[in-house]
Image (cartoon, helix red, strand yellow):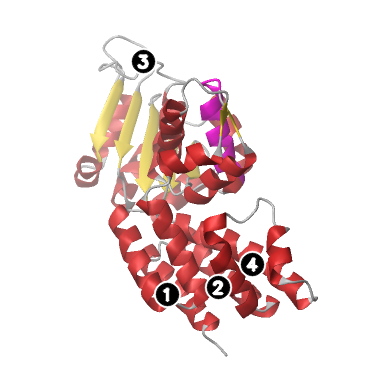
Amino acid sequence: MKIADRSVDGFLKRPDAKIRAVLFYGSDLGLIRERATQIAKTVLPDLSDPFRLVELPAKSVRDDPARLADEAAAIAFTGGRKVVWIKDAGDGATDAAESLFAQSGWDALVIVEGPELSTRSKLVELFAEDDTAAAIGCYPDREAAIERVVEETLALHGLEIAPDALAFMSEHLGGDRGVTRAEAEKLALFCAGQKTVTRADAMAAIGDSAAVGMDDAIAGAFEGDSVKLSRALGRLRGEGISPVAILTAAQRHAQRLHLVASAVADGAPALSAIRSLRPPVFFEAAASFERQARRWSPALVGRAISLLTEADLRCRSTGSPAQALLGQVLQAIGGLARRP
């Protein structure tokens, strides 16, 4: 079966008793690993137990499809239910999974990680269609989920976070759940001894070249500055920043620009419209945002939003080359910005 996003948290805490195999797939490796670990601990709280935890290389089950079923059926030397874990699996593991599902005499929990597998992959379809298996998509967090992770992590350290600081975090994180948690932990250490995390704290802790590069790429696209855009994309690619995270930030920027462009079209001064945004535009980006507000009409911003949404969906669901799609859509937006 396929687990809907809204049901994932509940399923991971109390897995359906009939589910014996779970596939975590998608582009967010940090979230895949976090969820796989969470469900593994429902069976085996101590994941260092060498007798009840078996890790199989993806290549081994691809070369010997029967091995997965054999390991799942084997009884642990010390007793208790086993966890059989396969990482970095691709469609090459489909034969092994089919062989496993054809057997009935196994009780282990089988966990498969399939980073970058799309919903159309054979392995995902197999897990989604089997009554004893589950397929769970893992993609970069949206804004609300990013904010929840940041707030939860900081709360564990006795910290609250100011709204503008949280907005900064959500705009510059989200490509990978593991990275989001790591950055939130880094911020907590940076603010040790305080009660509240400010935006200045957030910028000092995570405002690195990657964050600046993301802002530059989006500004370059919406200002029609192809040189600035190309340089920023090159820097982001070198930093290993997720294309989906950049697309998410660009969509959020476009939605805010649409609000301002609509207000300007109705006769409001550009600066007044910009100042009405919540959270407010950071002062470093205010001049660029004003130039964009004067350049873009509501209809043209709507076209940009459509392009970004289409690219985002293709990156998340079809296995298309994300870096190429990102470059294409931002260059296309740059072309719209350069129109007379």
First in sequence: mark 3 vs mark 4: 3
Q: Is residue 311 above or below residue 126?
A: below
Residue 307 is labelled as 2
Tell me, yes or no, if residue 23 can be seen here. Answer: no
Q: Which quadrant, please, contains the C terminus?
A: bottom right
Q: Is residue 84 above or below residue 265?
A: above
First in sequence: mark 4 vs mark 2: 4
**Amino acid, disc 2:** Leu
Q: CA distance from mark 1 to mark 3?
A: 46 Å
Label 3 vs label 2, nearer the camera: 2
First in sequence: mark 1 vs mark 3: 3
Crowd rating for badge 2 (residues with CA inside 10 Å; few <14, some 14–19, many 20+): some
Q: Main secondary structure of the magenta part?
A: helix
- Total tally of numbered discs in the picture: 4
Residue at the right extreme of this rendering: 266
Q: Is residue 187 above or below residue 332?
A: above
Residue 328 is labelled as 1
**Amino acid, disc 3:** Asp
Residue 151 is a magenta residue: yes
Q: Where is mark 4, residue-wise?
A: 257
Please, what secondary structure does the residue beneath circle 1 have? Answer: helix
